[in-house]
Amino acid sequence: MIKQNIEKVRTRIVEAALRAGRSPEEIRLMGVTKTRSPEVIREAFNAGLDLVGENYVQEAEEKIISLGDTARQVEWHMIGHLQRNKAKKACQLFDCIETVDNEKLAKALSRHASAFGKEVSVLIQVNIAKEPQKSGVLPDDAYSLIAQIADLPSIHIEGLMVIPPYSSEAEASRRWFRATRELRDHLSSLFEGQVKLRELSMGMSNDFEVAVEEGATIVRVGTTIFGPRRR
Ligand SMILES: *Cc1c(COP(=O)(O)O)cnc(C)c1O
């Protein structure tokens, strides 16, 4: 089941890329594995999944320990809100933190990554629709945040991550994906290549094809691969 689901999602990504005149190799499929057991995750690895997203540090740690050597053969991204007091553990576990939205968190990540002698990728989470109560830096504040943290050691800003307002209609997300890509292009030109914002992490089960059409390089898919979540 999981194998077929992954293959179907990959096919839909390729088709969306071709519709948009993009090269399908630009897009990576992330399996979002919150609430899934190590056994299920292993099944996904066996089906070729090589990028995993987890929302909680503690939950990720338990799975990574349980998966042992297999865990080290894939890339792990933190996609949930990260509290600063979990920054150390997050640095230890993850290759990329996609949810950096403030300077203090970035500094903590930099400090811990340096102490581990590790290089950690980060994405800037943008609250693109300026929703109250939602994580992410506001679009207007993204430039100054990136300027503040771009030179910190041991962390590398690779791009932007976004969770648009929820809608059951995929098309409703399009304007937010487009706005995120335009923000990325704008920021890239302001930084004149000194900060490379190659990655756009956007699109989930309900709207990943629209995200690919609008420039996503990472799509984060849970339910469509693993089925409905119980919690
Ligand atoms: C849970 C989650 C996903 C995956 O959602 P699905 O609708 O199950 O595909 C993607 N991104 C983030 C940030 C999530 O928390």
Image (cartoon, rainbow, N blue to C red):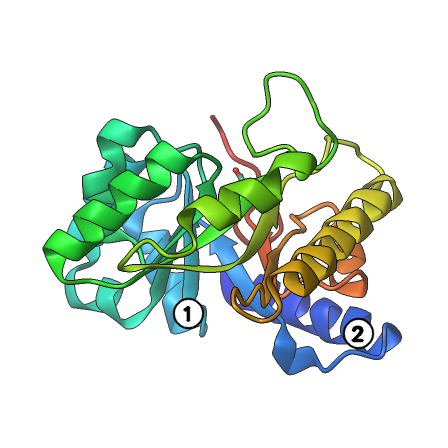
Q: Which residue is mark 2?
A: 15
Q: Is residue 213 visible?
A: yes
Residue at coordinates 58% horizontally, 68% vertically from top-left?
198
Sequence-wise, the earlier of marks 2 and 1 is 2
> For this rendering, which residue is in front, 46 or 142?
142
In which image quadrant can residue 27 be found? bottom right
- Which residue is tagged 1? 50
Left-right relation of 152 to 171: left
As displayed, is residue 219 above or below residue 54? below
Residue 53 vertical placement versus 75 (above, below): above
Q: Which residue reaches farthest top?
A: 133
User: Residue, x 41% and y 69% (percent of image)?
Assistant: 50
- x, y percent for residue 204: 65, 48
Compare residues 183 and 151 and report the one nearer the observer: 151
- Asked if 38 appears above or below 121 in the picture, the reply is above
Mark 2: few/some/many CA within 10 Å (<14, 14-19, 20+): some
Q: Position of residue 151 (x, y in %)?
A: 37, 57
Give the residue type at disc 2: Glu
Task: Say the numbered circle drawn on residue 23.
Answer: none
Residue 124, percent from left and from top: 52, 47
